Image: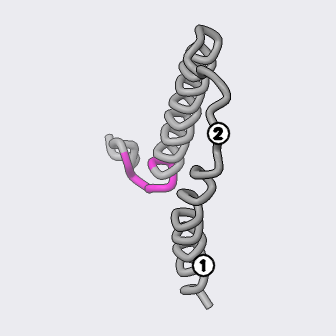
Amino acid sequence: MPGTAPRLAALLWALLLALTPAAAAWARPVGSADGPADVALAVGLTIAAATVTGLWLRSRYRREEAEQPGGGGEDGEP
């Protein structure tokens, strides 16, 4: 059944979004989270995520270009 995976994913996202506010209401403030180490960690994680995403997109489009025959003028004509 090819249609069940997207429906299951949508259901899981809906449950996550529905239950997240209740979990956030239980949280208590424990201190400031904007110290220099926290900012450096956030910047580092953001840069790492952007790099990984860029490399993944680059490999994906290179794979698609390699699968297309005759792409880029390499069809053997003089």
Q: Name the foreground residue: 34 vs 53.
A: 34
Relative placement, left or right, of 53 versus 41 is left
Q: Which residue is at a point 59% across and 8% down the rendered structure image? A: 36
Amino acid on which the number 2 mark rests in the picture: Arg
Q: In the rendered structure, does residue 66 fall within the stretch colored magenta?
A: yes
Q: Name the foreground residue: 30 vs 68.
A: 30
Q: Which residue is at a point 49% across and 42% down the rendered structure image? A: 57
Disc 1 target residue: 8
Q: Which mark is residue 60?
A: none
Per the rendered image, the range of residues in magenta is 65-71
What crowding class fits label 1: few (fewer than 14 Cα within 10 Å), some (14-19), or many (20 or more)?
few
Disc 2 target residue: 28
7 relative to 33, above or below: below
Q: Nearer the viewer, mark 1 or mark 2?
A: 2
Q: Position of residue 21 (x, y in %)?
A: 53, 57
Q: Quadrant of residue 22?
A: bottom right
Q: Position of residue 34 (x, y in %)?
A: 55, 17
